[in-house]
Image: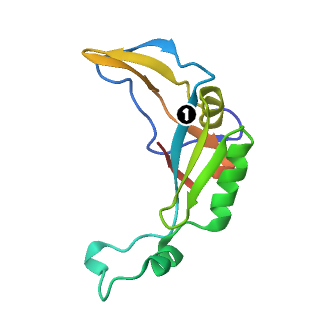
């Protein structure tokens, strides 16, 4: 793992069954991703009692921390990614940039794959790595 980076737990992806990499993804193609953020532990279904809470209360109680979202935005912008649609309530944000920028930000190598009776598709194998500053904040990259 490169210094200053950490593997994103649960991100390891084997090669798609029956698919083979036929090319690198075009480094200049634009890609969009959804990034999920950590937040307070949600209650177990059996522990939920009383009336439903409104969206504002839910966001304040269970949403992502604004400072964490700002940290993610700052880190991703260092790679040239544009961060938008930040939602503390849903613990998510969206980012867009080129394949090259995404590869650098998340330590991946996007490729073009083809499979049996399947049109070519862009994908990856292996694990995602994130800047160490995002460890414990970013929970997923989709």
Q: Nearer the viewer, residue 47 or 57?
A: 57
Judge left or right: residue 77 versus residue 127: right
Q: Going 44% across and 69% down the picture, which residue do you hit? A: 41
Pick the residue in front: 50 or 97.
97
The answer to whether residue 36 is above or below residue 25 is below
Left or right of 86 on screen, residue 42: left
**Residue 136 in view:** no
Number of numbered discs on residues: 1
Residue 59 image offset from top left, x and y in percent: 50, 73
Residue at 60% across, 67% down? 65
Q: Closest to the observer: 20 or 122?
A: 122
- Say which quadrant the N terminus sits in: top right
| Quarter residue 29 falls in | top right
Residue position for label 1: 31
Estimate the x, y position of residue 24 in percent, counting from the top left.
Answer: 53, 15
Q: Residue furthest right?
A: 78
């Amino acid at each position: 793992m490169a210094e200053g980076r950490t593997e994103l737990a649960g991100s390891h992806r084997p090669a798609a069954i029956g698919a083979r990499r036929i090319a690198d993804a075009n480094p200049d193609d634009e890609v969009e991703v959804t990034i999920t953020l950590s937040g307070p532990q949600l209650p177990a279904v059996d522990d939920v009692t009383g009336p439903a809470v409104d969206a504002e209360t839910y966001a304040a109680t269970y949403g992502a921390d604004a400072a964490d979202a700002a940290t993610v935005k700052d880190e991703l912008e260092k790679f040239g990614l544009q961060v938008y649609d930040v939602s503390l309530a849903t613990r998510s944000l969206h980012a867009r940039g080129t394949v090259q920028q995404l590869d650098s930000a998340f330590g991946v190598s996007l490729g073009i794959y083809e499979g049996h009776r399947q049109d070519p598709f862009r994908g990856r194998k292996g694990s995602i790595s994130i800047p160490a500053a995002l460890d414990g904040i970013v929970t997923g990259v989709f």
